[in-house]
Image (cartoon, helix red, strand yellow):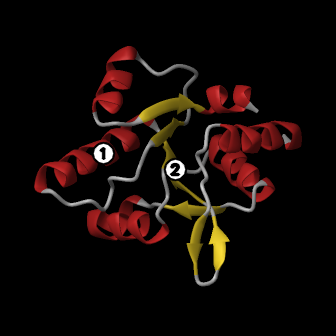
Amino acid sequence: MNDYAKALSIGFKTLDMIPDVMAEGKDWRFIGIQAKNQLDWLLIHFANMYQRTTTVALYDTLGVEATKFCINQTRMVTIAGTLDMLHKLCKIKKEETESGATNLARIKFFIVMGCETVPQADRTVFEDHGLTVYTIGDVHKKG
């Protein structure tokens, strides 16, 4: 598991998924995760530790406004989650874009957890909203 997490962390850097964010006088890195507990959640969290990246848990119970606040506050560009959770975030991003708000505009990457491939129909939906989609395996291979 250590080797997998280390390679995954290198994939995050290679794909520019964890840019430095200057806040409070120092550089931070963030990845959001919106999913129920599972092995991929833990692997991403361990990978984050290798790159000095903070894991931001985006719970369903936070609600839409709190989720948008967390994403905006951290200026994260990457969120990992299950396909259904990512569709919910994509819908929120679309509504934000249509209303002229910019809270979720900086989200660029979705990492799909819990599946080996992303169906083309889902990939198209995400890409139509300016999102690049990877499975956790895809990111791992980049490391």
Q: Quadrant of residue 40?
A: top right
| Residue, far bottom | 24
Q: Residue 74 location, x and y as percent?
A: 49, 68
Q: Which quadrant is the N terminus positioned in? A: top right
Asked which quadrant contains residue 71, the reply is: bottom left
- Near mark 1 (Cα within 10 A), the count class, few <14, some 14-19 or many ≥20, is few
Q: Position of residue 65 (x, y in %)?
A: 27, 68
Q: Residue furthest left?
A: 99
Residue for point 41% across, 17% down: 119
Viewed as shown, does residue 9 lie left or right of 80? Answer: right
Residue 36, numbered label: 2
> Would residue 35 be seen by someone viewing this image from the given angle?
no
Q: Secondary structure at mark 2?
A: loop
User: Which residue is at the front of the view, 94 or 136?
Assistant: 94
Q: Amino acid at mark 2?
A: Lys
**Disc 1 secondary structure class:** helix
Q: Residue 35: percent from the left, percent from the top?
A: 49, 49
Q: Which residue is mark 1?
A: 88
Q: Residue furthest right?
A: 3
Question: Closer to us: mark 1 or mark 2?
Answer: 1
The residue depicted at 33 percent of the width and 56 percent of the height is 104
Q: Quadrant of residue 56?
A: bottom right
Q: Which mark is residue 16?
A: none
Three-letter code for the amino acid on which mark 1 is drawn: Lys
